[in-house]
Image (cartoon, coloured by chain):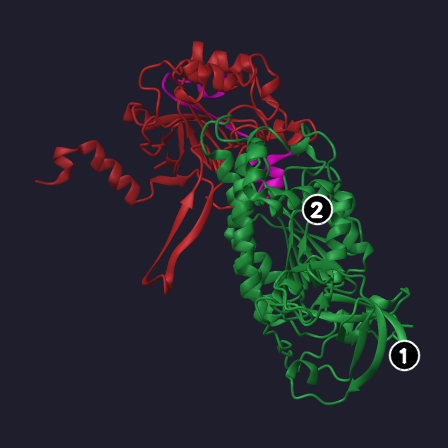
Amino acid sequence: MTMPLMRPARKNPILRTPQMNLPPSARSRVALSLTAAAAEGRFELQVCQDCDSVQYPPREACVHCVSPRLKWRAQTGLGQLLASTTLHHSNDLFFRERLPWRLGMVALDAGPSVMVHLHSEVGEAPSRLRVGARLDRAGQAVLIGFPEKESEHMADDKMLREMGSDPKFRKALVTDGKTPVGQALVRALVKAGADIVWVGHAEPWKKLPGLAELAALPQVTLLPLDLSNERSVITLAGEIGGKVDIVINNAEVHRSHGIGNRTGTDVARMEMEINYLGLLRLSQALGPALQGRAADGVTHASAWVNLLSIYALSNFPPHGTYSASKAAAYSLSQCLRAEMRPSGIRVVHVFPGPIDDEWNQNMPPPKLSPEALASAVIKALRDGTEDVYPGDVAQEWLQRWRDNPKVLEREIAAGGT
Amino acid sequence: MSMATTAPLLSALVEAMRTRRIEVIDLTQTLTPDFPQIALPPEMGQCWPFRIEEASNYDARGPGWYWNNFSCGEHTGTHFDAPIHWISGRDLPNNAVDTIPVQHFVAPACVVDCSTQVAQNPDYLLTVDDLLAFEAQHGRIPAGAWLLMRTDWSQRSDPEAYQNFDETGQHTPGPSTEAVRFLVDQRDVLGFGSEAIGTDAGQGYHLRPPYPCHYYMHGAGRYGLQCLANLDKLPPTGAVILSPPLKIQKGSGSPLRVLALVEHAA
């Protein structure tokens, strides 16, 4: 059994804060599809469309029949551990700083043999196990050997913690505590064991329900934060920047207007001011602080979550300017992800469909509950995924968008949802 | 030829200001991103808050100079309301900040002290009786003067206390409908000035008509000043207000610096 993670001792302030050294991250273009699936929490391998053989490592042509018709398909990952070893020495800086490190060779039931990072609960060979794909600190897919049966504290495994951003004992910032989504996120973080949750709130004179109850939680501290105000963002970063491990940027402006049913640009500007420029301000102010603490002990700075929208992929005209602002935010967040990558900070994109809140009052169900959205965010942090499409509507849009973005655009333009 | 011989009144003014016989008092709140703006239901068009970002600060963006860009609404911070701001004043001549006769930007003021009442009741409405009591003590309110309502509301430096919202909206002082009509119809004032965020009370939407100060003052071509400060430093009568708004084409109002000239006894 995995020992539960204990609250880490306070940092010794006279020692240098360790800096991040990433694990090896070079991958071929074809191997990046393994990463793309792992980014959503799936373990996929190529399957030959001519002879059905499963491929590993990723390749251009079938290892058996040389067919180029290889398709990425989800795998159960079930297999047999053939051998394991524990590293006590490595010239690679990432592993050298994290020794000992357990590795194994697994024969997958689907055919190929793979090298995996081994969870401590997997018994000695020969034994059954389940292989899954996770993103490592470099953001690349690696294969993990999980025990067949889950146990209570298995997420606290030392190797597995390197692959995710479990909120347990971490300190998080939720940028807007006034919305139902923000409040659900704060409660979910507290439930997940977060040490401190800082909760931003703009325009303190506007009293909205729920904030006082939230502030009464012992883990919660309210802080003034208005993403439209550069000084407010810089002040917040100055006050807590050196302590935040997880940033969840949920602050957004959402109005239901297209081009023709609202005169002028005031609404669109407000949406861009928070959804796009607000993210830029926050990234400039807080990004460097997180990067500097990416290897700071077992509760190091680890993740940045941006609440986007499935409408970032394709414009939903009834909420047209909101969609545009989320597309801009998505693009900027890709930039943030690229800039955070060298430090090992994971940038998580969350693409919900309509959320059950006041600004989607006129949208028919199904609508995503704030609680379901919050659960999906916590799961993504724990599992280390970086692309989250929570709920049925988001999943369906994603499939249609992947199938053919032009067809989706035409369906939506014709009044579909 | 000395100035005194060609402009004796202005020369006397300049001399009185030099000796501080005439003092200049700043009635303006500082423009900061933290100063609250008026809040309307969120589906409506909004007044932008004051926002400021550095263009450069002796750095790579401009090595030898410091400057900022700012944005705000016409009704942000201490600001001037022109008649065109309200639907009742929309068809009047010279009703926008760029066309208002400039001599109106220098005018005397009567300051009615309501600070005691407001300390008891944040929703306090200035009454006709308050105005008559003021006149009994200080003389008739002259035509063309500002009527400034002193409440000491500007001393609430916490934005939350300044806005004073609860679930039924804002609770800030202002004039009653009858007092506004008295000031316009019986006293021909230049306009009404307030320390709170609007010339109307926070609950002014529930008066008849809604927002009576905006409705009647602007409908009669009069002006508004709001978010004023330091009214406690003004005498009940005798101060002169300098309040030129920015010359915005067809502007409905503008943030501005409001100054008062106050004469001390010799």
Q: Which mark is residue B80?
A: none
Q: Which mark is residue A182?
A: 2
A320 falls in the magenta region = no
Can marks 1 and 2 be said to lie on one chain?
yes
Q: Is residue B119 left or right of residue A264?
A: right
Q: Which mark is residue A126?
A: 1
**How many numbered marks, from 0 up?**
2
Q: Name the residue located 40 percent from the left edge and 16 percent from the top edge.
A: B90
Q: Is residue B98 left or right of residue A218?
A: left
* Image mark 1: chain: A
Which of A112 and B230 lies nearest the eye of the viewer? Answer: A112
Task: Decide: few, some or many residues near mark 2? Use Cα within 10 Å; few <14, some 14-19, many ≥20.
Answer: many
Q: Name the residue located 64 percent from the left edge and 79 percent from the top edge.
A: A18
Residue interval drawn in magenta: B136-164
Task: Examine the rendered structure and indicate whether residue A404 appears above or below residue A40.
Answer: above
Give amino acid for label 1. Answer: Pro
Colour chosen for chain B: red
The percent coordinates of residue A3 (x first, y second) are 89, 73
The percent coordinates of residue A380 (x first, y second) are 73, 57
Q: Name the residue located 74 percent from the left edge and 32 percent from the top edge.
A: A365
Quadrant of res A28? bottom right
The percent coordinates of residue A199 (x first, y second) are 69, 51
* Gap in angstroms between the C-alphas marked 1 and 2: 47 Å
Label 2, secondary structure: give it. helix
Colour chosen for chain A: green
